[in-house]
Every structure is written in structure tokens, then in C-alpha cells.
């Protein structure tokens, strides 16, 4: 209790005593026991009243002992040696000294961090950096250590060796697997486009890598659908340990072409699984031609071109509004960037040919002209520039945009104004300005039978593509979304109640999925439908049937457990007689099997960078002893201070009332006024 409060209580007692003496003893002849009792009761009343005003408080301290956190991350991929991993993990679990010192949490990881349940060693990819980053996000700045049980071979993601997000989090790698370096020759990176066009040539780039001390001569063959189409002899050695092969292959017929690159194996080579690698190319007989029409150059134009052409089925040209109409005849879709009065000829051509188009507006748009030249929408522009944040519309149902994420997307530049859309439409993105959501579209899709268009009310799309890369380290989020929008706009087929979406080729079965959208007769998404997919391997004839599960506003069938090979499928809506069919190929490739030895050197560097130590399974006890003896992880005593009132005011108020009541009764009983 503070000194000031103690002094106030003493003062309250003195003042209370003074008031009692003045009331009962100053110029009063009352003496005896009755006077003393009345004085005492009045003193209690006055002193209690003053205590209510002072409200004395004191600090109550409670002490707790907080242990450091120990996170044990276990690699659950197919390249991990299971027996020694389980043995090391069991030793950690059985260490009472470790559990006494740490609060221990167990996690497994493959492509992402998962809660620990059991180990299957079936994950098809390893992303160590993502697991560490996710752990850092969920654990914050607490005092902690990380035990990383892995072989150090990462197949996707950022290089974990340079993980430095939290310099106060030491990492203790436990390198499992074979640390011996073996002589090995393998097919490394294989680069090929997903699509090629009939009667054209498509490029193929192959990296052949060698690890060993000798000099070797090996033959590399490239086959297409089982037929050898290219052969080359390569010489490799310790100093010249890689060779890049570039060639062009002919696209002679339409369909999926399975490409297999193989290099002859070494004598007694330990790992021959990495001596061959597969890819696939789909040869198509058509290409979507898209024109971006703009009066001036802008970064958005380059970003749109890069994004759209990430799908090789699409080609983008950039035209001025004054381009000859004969050049427009080969265009399937127009993107009109910030139209002005010079776009009159373009709009006239679009109206005459009924070509689909995508309008992008911004501060440089001539709204007087745009409102006059078309009747799909109008905007009463106030000519006041504003920054607009996108707001996703969860109810959008024209095509599946469930995977599109606008988290941290920067605002687009636009002009304030009231927007009226005059055609049937759905809003894909709404507007938010200065934290206030407006009932206005930012991106809307318009369409009817035979004609489709879209309108974006803002410029600087290039910032969205850059932010997509910052968020996921690739452009896939933005490019996939833009591809779906372009695919919708580049076809004039009427809206179907049931659509399916899938890739023609999957690199391994981990990503083999088929998605679908289904609408009722009013074209509202129906989440209660029963949709089954019948799948048949066209090589073996084996079949399987699984139901599609609802995932937000679409359905999904996961085929991650099927073996490699060509497949045909039919998705059917029960009791409706509606079905869609398609085909895809799953390549025989497991990137985890490309590694033979543990990358213990990189794990040791990771430990050094984070002020930890690296160990091997035989040193698990040393790891435990080191963690138990480390002074940086001693438990922390925490003091929680609560300010508590010295007296319960209800109890004190009751005492005051009781004292005054008893005083009144005594006075009345003794005939005093």
C-alpha cells in the first residue's frame, strides 16, 4: 500500500475522532457507558464513510514459472528413413529431463506444417522453409528452440539455409538418412512448355548432372510416346559435372505427348530412379488471339501481356486505337485500356462483329465518351482521383475463383463516381475506400446469350501481380485468376449449369484434382447436389468412383492416390442426367526419390546461422543433454500484479448502516433526540 494512502487513513481516523468528540462531548454533560457506546458507533460511521471515499488499495503479486517452448518438426516425406527417425523421436519423447525443462510441441511437415498425429512418410514434397516460417508466425517472440528432424533435401520453396526471420530462435537439425556420398548421374531440371501448336516445333531443355570423381560418357535419349526422337552422347567429370541439352521437337498431331528423358546408368549405381524424368506436352490446334488496345503505354499493359501469355494457348498483341480494322479480324477478345474518344472505330468494330471485350478504366478514361459509345454501364465521374481497395465477393458464381486471394493487394487508382450497370451481371470484386465498403463494383462480369464482357474500374493492375509474387513467391495467384477471366470472356458459349475444371497433365499424383461448379435451374450455386466421378485408367482398364466434396462455392474430387498413367473421367450429377467428361495424364515422377544422400552440410550451416547445433541420429542423447543444459532456456519466473481493494465496499457500507441504525435505536431507547 502506498504511503499516501496510509496517511489518508490516519487522517480519516483523526478527523472521525474529532467529529465524534465535537458531537458528543463538546459542551455536553453526557458521560458514562451510553456516551461511550454512542461515540464509538458514530466514529465507526464517520470512519467508514471516509474509507469509502479514500478506497484504499494494495498490490497483490502472483508468481508463475514459464518454461521455454521446444518445437519438434519431423519431415514426413517419402525420402525419409523411417526407422531411425522414429527411434530418435521416441528418445526425445521419453526424456523426462527434457519435458521438465520445456513445453514440447510436435509437428510433422511435407509441403506445409501440420499438427503431429502419426508418421506415414508419404508426403510428395518437402518445404522446410515454409514449415519454419509458419512456426515463427504461430509462436511469435516466445523463448523457444526448434529440433528439425529431416534429411535436408528440400524440393519446393525458398532456400531454408538462409532462414533468419528470428535470430533468437536456435534450430537444432537432426540429420537422418545416409550421409555417404555416392557416384551418381541423373536427369536434373527438365523444362518444357505445357502446350504446343500443331505443325510447329516446341523447345525442350534438359540438365544432366553428375556427382563423382571419375570421367564418364553416357547416352541421353528423349522419347515421345515411347518413340525415340532425340539422342546425344555426353561427357561428364568432376570438374565438368553438368550438361545442358537444348532441342526442338515436332508437334505432328493433336493430343498429349508423353516425353521421357533418360540417361544410361553407371555401373553399380545406387539410385537409378533419377536416371529418367517425364514431362508432357499437349498439342492443340487453336490459339486465342487477344488484343490490348491502348492510346498510351502503361505498366498494366506489360503485366496483362505477361499474365495472359503464361498460358501458351493465348497470344497477346498491343494495338493503338487507330490500327486498321483488317488487323482486328484475327482477334478473339479485345482488352480496351482506358478508352478515350480515339476508340470510336474500335467500339464500332466490336458492335458490328459482336466480339467480347474487357474494359479497364482509370483516371485517364474519357467518361463522357465511354458513357455515350456503349450502353452496358455508365459512370457519373466526379473527376476526383481515389485509391480503391478490392473486396472479394464470396457469392460470385459465374466461374470458380475460390483460390483467388486479394490479401495485402494494394489499391487501384480510380475516379469517384456513381456506377450503374444496365445488363445482367455479377460483381466479382467490390470497392472499399478509406476503410468504408461501398455498394459499388470494382470488377464486374456482364453477359448474356452470345455476348460477354467485363469492366474494371481502376488502373495499376501491375501492382496486384507484383503483390501476388510477394505473397507466394510466384505469380500463380494472379495469373490463374486472370486466365479464368480471359477463358470466360474468349468464348461465346452460353452459361452451363454444370462445368468441370482440370489440368491436362499433372506432374505426379499429388496435384491431381478435378473441380466442378453446379447451378440449379435459377443459376444459383447448389451445395446440396450429389456429384460422382467415375475414373478409368485407359492403359490398365482399372476404374474407381468417388464423390465430389463441396469446397466453398465449388466441388472437388481428389485423385492424389492414383498411380501414374493416362485417365478418362466422367462427372455426373445424380438424378439430373447431367454429366461432363474429360481426360488427363499423371506423370510418373516423385521428386523425393531424386535424392540419395542426406544434405547434412546445409543443415549444419542452418544451425550455425541460427546459433544452434546439428546432430545425427546416433547423437540424439547429446542433443537432449545439450538442450537440458543450455542456460538460455532456463524457465522464466513471471510476476502478475493485481491491484486489489483493501475493503469490500459492500461490506463496509453494511457496517456503516448497521452502526448508524444501532446508534439510532440506542438513542430512542434512552429517550434522546
Image: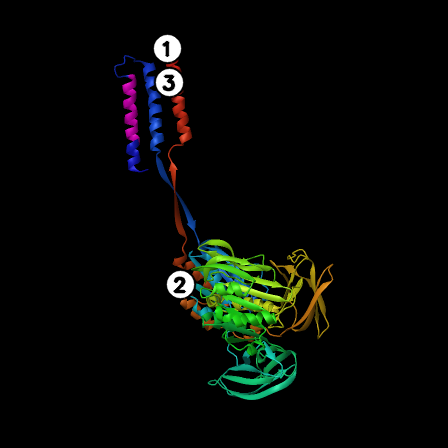
Earlier along the polypeptide chain: callout 1 or callout 2? 2
- Disc nearest the viewer among 1 and 2: 1
Residue 663 image label: 3
Label 3, label 1: how far apart the Cα atoms are: 12 Å
Queried whether the magenta region covers residue 80, the answer comes back as no
Residues 138 and 379: in front is 379
Residue at (34% x, 34% y) in the render: 56
Label 1, label 2: how far apart the Cα atoms are: 83 Å
Label 3, label 2: how far apart the Cα atoms are: 71 Å
Q: Is residue 35 left or right of residue 183?
A: left
Main SS of the magenta segment?
helix
The reply to whether the C-beta atoms of the residues labelled 1 and 2 are less than 8 Å apart is no
Location of mark 2 (residue): 167
Q: Whole-percent x and y of residue 378?
A: 52, 60
Q: In the rendered view of the protein, which quadrant contains the N terminus?
A: top left
Q: Which residues are magenta?
A: 9-24
Q: Whole-percent x and y of residue 69?
A: 45, 56
- Disc nearest the viewer among 3 and 2: 3
Q: Quadrant of residue 665?
A: top left
Residues 105 and 649: in front is 649
Location of mark 1 (residue): 671
Q: Whole-percent x and y of residue 616?
A: 48, 68
Residue at (35% x, 24% y) in the render: 45
Amino acid at each position: 500500500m502506498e504511503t499516501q494512502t496510509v496517511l489518508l487513513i490516519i487522517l480519516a481516523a483523526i478527523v472521525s475522532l474529532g467529529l465524534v468528540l465535537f458531537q458528543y462531548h463538546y459542551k455536553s454533560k453526557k458521560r458514562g457507558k451510553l456516551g461511550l457506546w454512542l461515540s464509538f458507533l458514530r466514529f465507526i460511521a464517520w470512519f467508514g464513510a471516509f474509507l469509502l471515499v479514500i478506497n484504499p488499495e494494495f498490490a497483490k503479486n502472483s508468481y508463475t514459472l514459464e518454461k521455454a517452448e521446444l518445437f519438434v518438426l519431423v519431415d514426413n516425406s517419402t525420402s525419409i528413413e523411417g526407422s531411425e527417425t522414429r527411434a530418435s523421436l521416441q528418445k526425445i519423447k521419453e526424456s523426462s529431463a527434457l519435458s521438465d525443462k520445456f513445453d514440447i510441441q510436435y509437428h510433422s511437415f511435407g509441403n506445409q506444417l501440420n499438427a503431429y498425429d502419426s508418421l506415414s512418410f508419404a508426403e510428395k514434397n518437402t518445404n522446410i522453409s515454409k514449415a519454419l516460417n509458419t512456426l515463427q508466425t504461430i509462436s511469435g517472440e516466445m523463448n523457444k528452440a526448434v529440433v528439425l528432424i529431416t534429411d535436408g533435401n528440400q524440393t519446393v520453396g525458398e532456400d531454408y539455409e538462409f532462414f533468419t526471420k528470428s535470430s533468437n530462435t536456435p534450430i537444432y537439425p537432426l540429420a537422418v538418412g545416409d550421409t555417404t556420398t555416392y557416384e551418381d548421374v541423373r536427369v536434373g531440371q527438365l523444362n518444357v512448355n505445357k502446350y504446343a501448336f500443331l505443325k510447329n516445333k516446341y523447345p525442350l531443355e534438359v540438365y544432366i548432372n553428375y556427382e563423382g570423381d571419375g570421367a564418364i560418357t553416357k547416352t541421353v535419349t528423349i522419347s515421345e510416346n515411347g518413340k525415340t526422337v532425340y539422342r546425344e552422347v555426353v561427357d561428364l567429370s568432376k570438374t565438368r559435372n553438368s550438361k545442358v541439352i537444348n532441342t526442338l521437337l515436332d508437334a505432328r498431331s493433336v493430343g498429349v505427348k508423353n516425353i521421357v528423358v533418360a540417361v544410361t546408368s553407371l555401373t553399380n549405381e545406387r539410385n537409378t530412379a533419377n536416371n529418367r524424368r517425364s514431362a508432357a506436352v499437349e498439342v492443340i490446334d487453336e490459339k486465342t488471339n487477344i488484343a490490348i488496345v491502348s492510346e498510351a503505354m502503361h505498366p498494366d499493359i506489360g503485366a496483362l501481356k505477361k499474365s495472359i501469355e503464361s498460358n501458351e494457348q493465348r497470344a497477346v498483341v498491343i494495338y493503338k486505337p487507330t490500327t486498321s480494322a483488317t488487323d482486328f479480324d484475327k482477334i478473339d477478345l479485345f482488352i480496351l485500356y482506358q478508352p478515350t474518344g480515339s476508340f470510336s472505330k474500335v467500339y464500332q468494330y466490336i458492335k458490328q462483329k459482336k466480339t467480347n471485350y474487357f474494359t479497364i478504366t482509370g483516371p485517364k478514361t474519357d467518361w463522357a465518351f465511354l458513357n455515350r459509345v456503349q450502353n452496358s454501364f455508365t459512370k457519373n465521374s466526379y473527376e476526383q482521383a481515389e485509391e480503391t481497395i478490392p473486396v472479394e465477393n464470396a457469392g460470385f458464381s459465374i466461374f470458380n475463383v475460390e483460390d483467388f486471394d486479394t490479401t495485402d493487394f494494394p489499391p487501384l487508382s480510380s475516379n469517384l463516381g456513381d456506377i450503374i450497370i444496365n445488363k445482367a451481371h455479377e460483381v466479382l470484386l467490390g470497392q472499399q475506400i478509406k476503410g468504408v465498403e461501398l455498394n459499388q463494383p470494382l470488377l464486374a462480369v456482364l453477359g448474356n446469350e452470345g455476348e460477354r464482357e467485363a469492366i474494371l474500374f481502376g488502373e495499376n493492375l501491375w501492382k496486384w501481380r507484383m503483390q501476388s509474387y510477394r505473397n507466394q513467391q510466384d505469380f500463380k495467384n494472379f495469373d490463374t485468376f486472370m486466365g479464368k477471366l480471359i477463358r470466360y470472356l474468349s468464348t461465346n458459349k452460353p452459361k452451363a449449369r454444370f462445368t468441370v475444371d482440370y489440368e491436362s497433365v499433372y506432374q505426379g499424383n499429388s496435384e491431381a484434382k478435378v473441380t466442378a461448379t453446379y447451378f440449379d435451374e435459377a443459376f444459383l450455386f447448389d451445395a446440396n447436389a450429389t456429384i460422382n466421378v467415375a475414373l478409368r485408367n485407359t492403359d490398365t482398364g482399372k476404374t474407381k468412383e468417388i464423390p465430389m466434396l463441396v469446397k466453398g462455392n465449388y466441388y472437388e474430387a481428389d485423385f492424389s492416390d492414383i498411380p501414374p498413367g493416362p485417365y478418362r473421367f466422367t462427372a455426373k450429377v445424380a438424378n439430373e442426367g447431367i454429366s461432363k467428361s474429360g481426360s488427363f495424364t499423371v506423370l510418373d515422377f516423385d521428386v523425393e526419390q531424386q535424392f540419395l544422400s542426406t544434405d547434412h552440410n546445409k543443415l549444419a550451416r542452418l544451425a550455425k546461422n541460427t546459433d544452434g547445433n546439428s546432430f545425427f541420429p546416433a547423437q540424439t542423447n547429446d542433443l537432449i543433454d545439450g538442450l537440458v543444459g543450455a542456460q538460455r532456456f532456463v524457465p522464466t519466473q513471471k510476476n502478475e500484479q493485481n491491484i486489489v481493494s483493501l475493503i469490500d465496499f459492500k461490506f463496509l457500507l453494511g457496517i456503516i448502516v448497521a452502526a448508524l441504525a444501532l446508534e439510532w435505536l440506542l438513542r430512542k431507547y434512552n429517550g434522546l433526540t
